Each structure stands twice: as C-alpha cells, then as structure tokens.
Image: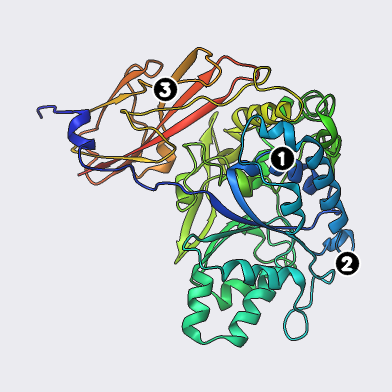
Amino acid sequence: MTRFVVALFFFLAGSLPLFAQQPVRLVVMTDIGGDPDDQQSLVRLLVHTDQFELEGLLTSSRLEHGQDTRPELIYRQLDAYEKVYSNLRKHSPTFPDPAYLRTLVKPGSGNQHVLGEGHDTAASDWLITVADKPDPRPVWVIVWGGQRELAQALWKIKQTRPKAEVEAFSQKLRIHTIGNQDGHERWILENFPGIFFVSSGFINYGYPHAPKIRETSAYRGVYMTGDQTLTSREWVREHVVENHGPLGACYPRDAAGKAGMKEGDTPSFLALLPNGLNVPEHPEWGGYGGRFRLIRQQLYIDAADFQDGLWNERLSVSRWRKYFQNDFAARMDWCVKSYGEANHAPVAVVNNQKGNDVLEIKAKAGELVRLSAAGSSDPDSNPLACRWWNYWEAGTYPGRVPVKNPDKPQAEVAIPEDATEATLHFILEVTDTGTPALTSFRRVVVYVQ
C-alpha cells in the first residue's frame, strides 16, 4: 500500500487540542493520624497546591488506628506551609494563601461504621457545599482512608432531594479511592451505580468480609516494585527532610511497615497533575496515578502494565517513579531556594501546540505520521533531551508500534497496515539537565481509520 505523509498542516488545521485541562477542583479526605503515610502525602500535596483548586481537607476516622480524627495534624502542616509560603510563591504565583487553606479543614466522624440519620458531620456537609457551587467543572474527591464521609454526603442528598437532583449531584463528582478501607465502597456503588469512580485496590471490594490483598493494587506501585532507592529513608532524608525547611521537617521518615517513603494515598492526586501525561477524565489511558480499566458504566478498576517481563497493576504507577520523585525533590527545594538556585519543569511542545493538552491525530493504516518537539523550552535555559515512545497498554492495538528517531526532536511513526480502527498512544518526554532533572510530557492519540 502506498504510504502517505500526514503533514502538520493537514491534521491540525482548523482544530484544537482535545481534552483541554482546566485546574482540577479537589477535595481530600484523609485518615491522617493513623499510618504516618498520610502525613507524608500531605507534605507532597502542599507543595503541589499551585496546580489544583483545593476546596476541602476533610478528616475521617483513623480506622484500626483509633475511632477518632486528628485535624490538628493538618493544621500543624499548614503552619509549616505558611513559613515557606513566600518562598514557594517565588517559583509559582498560584500557591494558595495559608489562611484560605485553614478554612478548608473540616472534621468528620471518628466512628467508621455509622451512616445515615443523625450522622452528618462538618466534613460530609462541606462536600455537599463544594459540589453545589455554580461551577461547571467536576469535583474530584480523593479518599485516602475510609469512605464514610463521602457515603454520608451521598446518603443525605438521596434522602433530601428529588431523583433528578440526586443524579445531577452525583454526576458532578469524580471519585478516586485508595482501597475500600472501611467497607462503605459497596454501599456507594450499589446506591449510585453511575457515579464516576476510580477504585484503586478494587480487589479489596469485599472488605471487611474478606481480608485485604496487597499484590494487585495499583496505588502500591508508588512505593513497591521498581527502584527502591527512590523511596528509601536515605532518599527522604536528603531530598525532603533535611535542609528543606519547616514543611520538610513535618515529613515522617518512616511509615507503617515501610522505612522511608510509603505515601500509599499519593497516586490519587498524582493522577490529576497537569503534566501533559495525565488525562483525569480518562483513567484507562494511564499516568502518574496508575492505569485503570472500565468494567461497567463509570467504574474503573486497577489495570496491569508491562515492565521487565512482568504484568502487574503496581507497574502502572512505579514506571513513573523517577519522574514524580524528581518533581517532588525539586518542589521541596522551592521551599528554601531562590528561583535561580532551583530547577523548574521544561515546556513540552508537539507540532507547534503548546500547553498540556492531548493532541488528536486521525490517520489511515499504512500512513506515516510526523511528530515534532520543536519549540520545547526550559525556563532555566537548561539543555533538553527528547524521547518518544508508544504507550501501547493505553491503546487498543495489540502490540508495540516503533517510533523512528525516538531520541530526536523530529520523529516518525509508520501506522501498521493492520491497525484499522485502533487507537495508538504516543508519549513525548522532554527532560532538562537541571538538578534534579525534570521531565514534562505530551500525549498524542492517533485514531486509525
């Protein structure tokens, strides 16, 4: 078959990038005060708050660690954040004011079991308040512990509003849970079967009637599998705790059952970072927070990626570890260093399109697609390296599609002859030479006709 060149002006003329990303509205539910990994995750979240519109910091039961809540631990970190706030603003002007963040702390119930009449809390009511705001964007609710506060908010809406309004309310929510840690997931999914729900650790859906299983939960890839030196106590000491100011001092050096970094809840917001790779509305496409498969309506559960001869759900997170750890280390530097002393992420450009949005290309089987990273830049004027690759697990074509000149700014992809009606995902990585080296991404989705 004759090959055709899909030229830049042909597939981009008169069109815009797909899935334009606005700042994510974010509510966090945390059982902070139980496993210290929630305190670890909160430090990381706070140095990324310039990338979200944070609208809630809700405490929930500490579960097996105690039937109570510990909002004072959030306030303690916010006090530390306030001490580095002015320095963080030197690097990004959109870091939120500490006084505003304090207004977002709302306590939930210490009793993980209760649900229904008489069990509303400041946390469950606040979630309703946030979702009711006249903002067309969805509200992402990330659940680091039990889901009781979410279930209570949904219970109240179901009891007090007409069916159409209940449906409208639930459709504004995007849920990402880390395990079924208090057993309320079953109630939510049975009563709101159409809700957008990413269940990381879905294998524990049967809890508390079935024991928890660790091996196939995507979120555990943040600290399990892959290069363990990047989660070690030594790495934490060097890049987070020592010489990184009051906020770094809040980071526990160890967590339950894990020396160094654990942060089992962190993938829930890593998945939402506007880094050019993540597409929050498409969990099946994969990214920093893992990759998930749709099993019914809008319920997504853990999916396996392939690395080093292994299939495992954890690999869908651990494959990105060097990138998100370097990003964290750089942002901890922002707490104490001037702009000129620290590193900042490069800007990745694909086919003259700036921003973090996904690019769509329509092509035919047998065609040649040209890709260009020309125009990519670095705010610190560091040299850049490019890498193109096929994220084949995210697509529908059963196999890898090679990229010609994968380490050059100008690359080409020959669409396979048998790829008709397939979807192919290609990732551009643009990495600088700063310390630590930082990478920005762009995702190109090719729809083969």
Cβ–Cβ below 8 Å for labels 2 and 3?
no
**Residue ID at (78%, 48%):** 38
Determine whether, in the image, residue 134 is placed left or right of residue 352: right
Residue labelled with disc 2: 67
Which label is found at residue 376? 3
Residue 291: x, y in percent? 52, 46
Task: Work out whether residue 367 can be spotted.
Answer: no
Q: Secondary structure under badge 1?
A: helix
Residue 417: x, y in percent? 20, 34
**Residue ID at (50%, 12%):** 383
Quadrant of residue 368 within the rendered picture: top left
Q: Nearer the viewer, mark 2 or mark 3?
A: 3
Which label is found at residue 44? 1
Quadrant of residue 245 within the rendered picture: top right
| Amino acid at pointer 2 | Gln
Q: Nearer the viewer, residue 95 or 223?
A: 95
- Mark toward the start of the polypeptide (2 vs 3): 2
